[in-house]
Amino acid sequence: MSLDVPKGEFLCVIGPSGSGKSTLLRCINRLLDPTSGRVLLDGVDLTRLRGADLRRARRRMGMIFQQFNLVRRSTVLKNVLTGRLGYQEGWRTLVPSFTSGDRQLAWSSLNRLEIAEKAAVRADNLSGGQQQRVAIARALAQEPEIMLADEPIASLDPETAVVVLDYLRDINRSDGITLMCSIHHFELAKRYADRIVAMRRGQVVYDGAPGNLDEAAYRAIYGRLGRE
């Protein structure tokens, strides 16, 4: 596949389970290494980076996971501060020490996601929707240029899913952060995305505006009629 994503776009990647959505996102930030091809960020080939160079590139990309990936026994504030770990250098990578600026960014991110009142609460005492808002705050604290959201609403009820997507759209539009979001929900993708890329069996089968997705395109993507 070949795909260009311009700065500031809200891109939704849709497709059936196993189509390659998560693999695509994880190849971008090198959680997975692609077996061939290149991943370019502002002309820099991420697949060639190692060590400190890869760490510096990764801090430009915030990651939001389906299962939140919080440290469950740590407080909300400590979880958000881990978004600053990519800025630690030398011995601080072994024994992290967060600056007042780091803490200010963490608090600002929590306030942005309207969950600062839970700062001292352990992550495992939060609801799923609250945990995902903490995960978004953690990614935001990185001061990223790109956010990669891998099925961020798959574990949430429909009402909470809309709340989470509203936050992501606000971050995208207000901060100009490029957002790539893999998502199963066809109608929500059409509602929030500037552009939709659909995958099937590792191939792009649709790339275009949400409004152009008709029943024929839906059949090409999912191989059936109906809505998720």
Image (tube, rainbow, N blue to C red):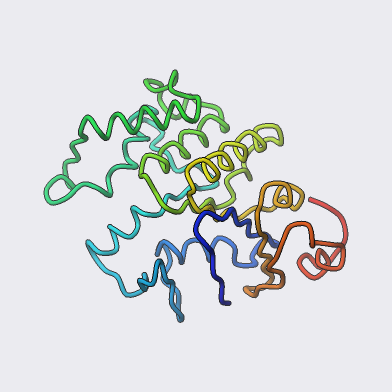
Residue visible at 64% across and 37% down in the picture: 156
170 sits left or right of 30 in the view:
right
Q: Position of residue 51 (x, y in %)?
A: 23, 64
Viewer-closest of 26 and 46 = 46
The image quadrant that residue 202 belongs to is bottom right
State the image coordinates of residue 40 (x, y, percent, origin top left).
Answer: 42, 71
Looking at the rendered structure, the number of numbered marks drawn on it comes to 0
Q: Is residue 79 above or below residue 146?
A: above
User: Residue 30: x and y, percent?
Assistant: 40, 64
Residue 127 to residue 67: above or below: above
Name the quadrant of the N terminus.
bottom right
Residue nearer the viewer, 32 or 72:
32
- Which residue is outermost to the bottom? 36
x, y (%) of residue 96? Answer: 19, 40
Q: Residue placed at 35% from the left, 71% from the top?
A: 44
Relative side of 222 to 2, left or right: right
Outermost residue, left direction?
A: 91
Q: Residue at x 49, y 58 (%)?
A: 7
